[in-house]
Amino acid sequence: MFFHAHPDDEALLTAGTMARLAGQGHRVVLVLATSGERGLAPDALRERGLGAVRRAEAHASARILGCSRVAFLGYADSGHEPAPAPAPARAGAEPFAAADVDEAAARLAALLTEERADLLTVYDPAGGYGHPDHVQVHRVGYRAARMAGTPVVLEATVDRTLLLRGLRAASWVHRFPPQFDRDSFRQAYGARAEITHRVPVKRHWRAKRASMSAHLSQARGGDSERTLAALGRLPGPAFRQVLGTEWYIQRGLPAGPVLRDPLATLPGAGAAARGR
């Protein structure tokens, strides 16, 4: 079960792993805390109801990746900045970041129990780049896994060392907007020393790129092109190189080699799985 805050988060962080596991015959379930109705998007899409648009995009992405089910916890998108008005997009929908952790975890735990999930992905404690809904995914996911007895929890993240190196290289050829603070990423995502799984997904690059493309509403926000669209335009070889690995942290693992198989630490997986 892959637990994400908003539609399109799965495309960027875990789509290759999802396609890989689905291709191996595993049942893959995508759970989204919100519909992402406060994401950046052109006004025309907002007038149509951005939440409904993004829910449809999530279902399209999931079909591409081979998911067997998509579920929404039913919370409102908290937004990265304070809302100009307190009213959520749907009557009675509480912002996810403000939700009671135990109550939200109980909703997720019910899905974990129903699906008999043996693995759950969440985010690192920083919530990647610090979005309040992403931080809440970390809290709620771990609590739900304890409630449901889910044996393995992986934190989807990015190798911070590679991210900072990539941002430096990109700044040589790309002019970031004035509000972009490259230094803010020095505490984002996961430190290299923490990463326990480095999952190769180059074979599934086409599915990952198609998953990203399914989130058409997120191609532009405000007056600028979004990261999703910029990455999606990379030529195939460059896309495989830049996005051909997905990273995870499993807390409490003894020191050892970085694993390549997301299922390597499942009970009974055995030494052979650990090396794949």
Image: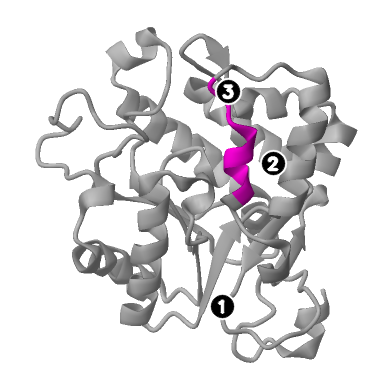
Q: Nearer the viewer, mark 1 or mark 2?
A: 1
10 Å crowding of disc 1: few (<14), some (14-19), many (20+): few
Q: Residue at x 89, y 35 (%)?
A: 237
Q: Disc 3 residue type? A: Arg
10 Å crowding of disc 3: few (<14), some (14-19), many (20+): some
Q: Is residue 64 above or below residue 252?
A: above
The answer to whether residue 10 shows anywhere in this view is yes
Nearest to N terminus: mark 3 or mark 1: 3
Q: Disc 1 residue type? A: Arg
Question: Residue 242's spot in the image, x, y percent?
Answer: 80, 41
Q: Is residue 271 left or right of residue 147?
A: right
Depth order, front residue of 68/222: 222
As for residue 144 lying within the magenta part, the answer is no
Real-space Cα separation, disc 3 to disc 1, in angstroms: 32 Å
Helix, strand or loop status at disc 2: helix
Q: Disc 2 residue type? A: Ala
Q: Residue at x 67, y 61 (%)?
A: 191
Q: Residue at x 59, y 74 (%)?
A: 250
